Structures are given as structure tokens and as C-alpha cells.
Amino acid sequence: MRALLAPLWAQSGLNLYMVLSSFGIHILGLTSTVFVMLVYGRYLSHGIDSTLYTLVTGALIGIGTEIFLRRARYKIVAALCASESRKLSEQVSHTSLNARSGALQSHLDLSANNGGMSTWLERIGQAVSPHPVVALLDMPFAFLLFGVLFLLAWQLALCALLVVIILLLFLGISIHRIKAITTNHQAIQGKFNNLLKNVEQPETVRINNAQDWLAQRLADGSGDSRVSKHALQLQQEKIQSQVRSATMFMSVVIISVGAALSVHGDLNFGLLIGANILSARLIVLISQPLQQMPIWLNALQAFKRVKAFIDLPEETQKGSTLSTYQGKIRFKQVMFSYPNSPLMVYENLNFVLGAGECLMVTGGNGKGKTTLARLILGLVQPMRGSILIDGVDLRQVNAYWWRQQLVYLPQDPDLLPGTLRENMTFIDGSIDDDQIKAVLHRVRLGEWIELHPEGLDMEITMRGRNLALGIRRRIAFARALLTKGQLVVLDEPLEGLDKEGIAMMQGVLVELEKEKRTLIVISQFMQPLKNGAKYLNLDERHVMQIATSHSYDAPVIAAKGMAI
Ligand SMILES: Nc1ncnc2c1ncn2[C@@H]1O[C@H](COP(=O)(O)OP(=O)(O)OP(=O)(O)O)[C@@H](O)[C@H]1O
């Protein structure tokens, strides 16, 4: 709650202004009450017109000043709320870009059914906005109005208190109910939104002839969503109607009790009208923040989720960097399983790879080949054991520096939105067009880029998914090669490549080996690389030295059943 009210104590100078201006607003808010009493007491009893002019002028100045103060306060609160929302969005962006990938992914997996970050931020935005914050600022001044009412006539103050207590009881019950209805609505809406995402995969739906099935589920989901929304709106309307009824009830009580007091000579007419105005304001001050309660409750829940997100562990950007990385890597008693998965990927994985050595990693589907690459990249961390690079624990190493030491080709690479040139230079802004063209030639995309009308200015959209798989993988490989990293990790390097692409990959591997880079080649279909290459079969969970002799002149990686 404190965090949601952050705008109220964001800047101490403005806080003081807001408290003082609120005080001024509520003192000036008494203008109409005082005006009525004075008109009755001074003008009606003596009938001097100049008194009326003076009173009207005073009332208009009071009301005008109140309006001015209200507007000024509203603008300041709006600016503070905007600044708080911006801060929160910045924190979320920072976490999205810097949290450990494994932690981030498991958090996103868990939260997929709860609406997701944009929904949470929107809910917080609704609460951290001027209207609810101002309503909350005004609430304590109900005591001021109550005190004034007490001074006017304690009997009327007691009546007003009674009406307020009854209103609070009713509102309390309604708010309790609306909480459950809101939770139910959010769950139903979340499910429906997830279902809607399937419509974004039209080809999958058509290939499986799943149109009727999806249409039925969408209709059911939309029906449930409408029903739960309707229930929520009904409950909101009920709260508003309780407030309206309380206002009218208050008026009836105050006027009738006040009239009885007037008849007995304990209260004059001016005081009665003034008390009626005050009691109506009292209801507004108390009910306004309570009416915002559902928004606050929603926002509180959302804030807990956003906070959990912001608190995700970050990658080590402060860690050490080695003066040079030789290329040695060691897995020492590594145990790993994904956070939300009951399956253990590795129980005790051990291997050592010296600088310039080559490791072939193989294994069946789901045996942990890609996970091995993710561990090396530092995207996920071992639960037990350690990964050492040149003898230093990867956990202590600066993640940004470490990725510059790697040439990594993912199994299913994505490109980032931007031009092709930008995609090639994210890792190092000093890379020029000649270097980009040279590396594109190296992966045999030279002709492709020269023939393309936009060249390096070509815009990459849809994460590069609208490019042919082989082209996307070659671009990703070219991008990786630009790091000139000492450790090369290739995940299924032949996937999606044509004959020419396979030849290119073999050629580049020979060059990398000659340059004494350390190679880790991951592939389901693999034959031993060469004499002395290490071979890790994740089906067997052990490492062995390959004794058979092969050379790079022979096919370095042979896809099963594929003639190279
Ligand atoms: N993000 C994740 N969250 C939970 N479990 C995961 C995640 N990614 C992979 N896994 C699980 O970890 C295990 C190893 O997956 P991994 O992708 O490393 O296998 P793989 O050997 O590369 O498979 P393939 O040959 O099909 O690419 C699998 O059981 C998989 O379901």
C-alpha cells in the first residue's frame, strides 16, 4: 500500500504543498456553509443590501480560491503520479533486460494466466492516478467537517455519525464481495485472453482443422467473460447506489432532526441549511476513497506481482572480467533442473575442455543439449556445482563481458527489430559495413545481400521469422562470428542449411579450429569430429575421449541419413 501511495511522499516540498493546499481547500469548502449562516443571521435579519453584496463577494472569492487550489493540487498530483508510473515502468524495463534469463522465463511462465505485465501496470496506473490519490488526501478532512458540525449542533453531528457508520457497514460488505467477484473476473478474463492468442497462429489452427473447436471455446470464453464482467459492474453500481442513498438519507435525517431543534428554538434556519451542506460533503469525503477500494485492491495485487518481477535476480554485470580468456571451460559436478519442472536435466555433469579443444555434444530429444549451451551462456545457473572458465567460476564473471568471449549460434535464432546493420553491430558499435559484408561473405550470404535492394538497411521484422530458416541461421551465425570470441558454441549447426550452407559451416569450423578456438558443437546427429575430439553423449551422461581418427577434410558433422 505504501508503495502505491508513493506519489504522496515522492517529494517532500510538494507533499507539504499538497497537505497545506488540502487544508486550505477544506477550510474554503466551508464558505457556502458560512455564507448561508451569515445571509440568514446578518442580511435577512437587518435587510441591508450592502451586507448581501459583501457576503456574495466574499463567498465568490472563497469558492474561486478553492477551485484554483483544487486545480493546482490536481495538476501536482497528476505530475507526481506520472513520474511514479514512469519510475515503475523503468524498473520493469530494467528487470526485463537485466534479470537472469532463467528466472525471468519461469516468472513469465507462472504469470501467463494472471494477465501479464501490461495488465498489472495498467491496474497500478488506475490506482496511482490523480482521482483516487486526491480522494485519499481529502478523506482525513472528514474529521474537520465533523468537528464543525459538532460545533453547530452536537445532535446533528451524532445523527451524521450514525448515518456514516451505517454507510460504512454497507460499503464494507459490498467491497468484500467485489473483491471475490474481481478475482473471479480476472481469472476468467486471463483464460480468455490466453485463448485469444491462438487466433494469432492462424496457420496452426487451419492445418489442424481446429476452427470449429477454437470458435466454440472462444464463444464459451467470451460468454463467461461477459457474465463475470456483468457481475462486477452490478456490484460497482450497487456501491454507487449505496452512496447515493446514504446522501439522501443523511439529508432527510439532518433536515428532520434540525427542523425539530428549530421548532424548539435550539437551532436557527441558517445553521440548519449550513449543517445540511456540511453533512452532504461529509458523505462525499468518506465515500469517495471507499468507492476507489476495488481499484486499490486490484492495484495492490498487481503491485505484489510487479514487485516480485522487479526483485528477480539480475545477471552479474558487476562481476570480474579476465584480462584474456584462453578458452578453457570446465563443468564440475553440475546439477541442473528448470525451476518449474520436476525433471532433473543433469544430476552430476563433469567435463573439462582445454583451450583450443573440441567437444561434440549429442543426445536424444530433451536430454539437455540446448540447456548445456544456456548454462555456458550464463542464461541459467547450476543448482549445484559450478562452471569454471579459465578456472574462474562463471557466477563471478561479468555477464556482458562473458558474452563477448563467445561465438554462439542458437538452435532457433531470433533477430532483433531494426536494420540488418543494427543487428550485426549490437555487440560492438565499432563494427563497420566492410566488416559486416566480409562476415556475410564468410557465411555465403554475400551475393544475397548484394542483390537485396535495401542491403544492410533492410528492416528486420517479426524477429526475422519471415526470412527463410537457412538465411536467418546464417545471419545469426555471421552476427556471432563478429564477436571473435574464443569459445564457439554451435547448437545444431546444420539445421536448416542447404548443401552450400553445410559446406560453409564445415569450412568455417576448420578455420575456427585452425585459429585455436575452443569448439562445442551440439547435434543430435553426429559423428566423431577428429582424433582427440571429446565426445559427450547426454543419453549416457558421461564424457569419453574419441579414439577414432577423422579429419576436417572429411565431413566434420554428418547429419544422419544426409549425404554430404
Ligand atoms: N524453459 C524451460 N522450462 C522448463 N523446462 C525446460 C525449459 N527448457 C527446456 N526444458 C526441459 O529441459 C529438458 C532439456 O531440454 P533441452 O531443450 O535442453 O533439450 P535438447 O536436448 O536440446 O532437446 P532437442 O533435441 O529437442 O532440442 C527437457 O525435458 C525440457 O522439457
Image (cartoon, rainbow, N blue to C red):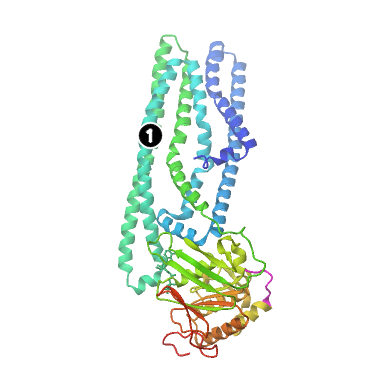
Name the chief secondary structure element in magenta. Answer: loop
Is the residue 345 above or below the residue 548 in the image? Answer: above
x%, y% of residue 324?
Answer: 66, 69
Q: Which residues are magenta?
A: 427-433
Q: Please say whether residue 429 is one of the residues in the magenta stretch.
A: yes
Give whichever of 455, 305 is nearer the camera. Answer: 305
x%, y% of residue 520?
Answer: 53, 76
Is the residue 320 above or below the residue 144 in the image? Answer: below
Give whichever of 66, 482 is nearer the camera. Answer: 482
x%, y% of residue 559?
Answer: 45, 84
Pointer 1 local density, CA inside 10 Å: few below 14, some 14–19, many at least 20: some
Give left or right: position of 428 versus 542. right
Is the residue 562 above or below the residue 321 in the image? Answer: below
Tell me the element at label 1: helix
- Mark 1, residue position: 172
**Which corner quadrant of the image does residue 206 belong to?**
bottom left
Is the residue 245 above or below the residue 402 in the image? Answer: above
x%, y% of residue 69?
Answer: 60, 33
Q: Please say whether residue 71 is one of the residues in the magenta stretch.
A: no
Give amino acid for label 1: Gly
Give whichever of 451, 436 is nearer the camera. Answer: 436
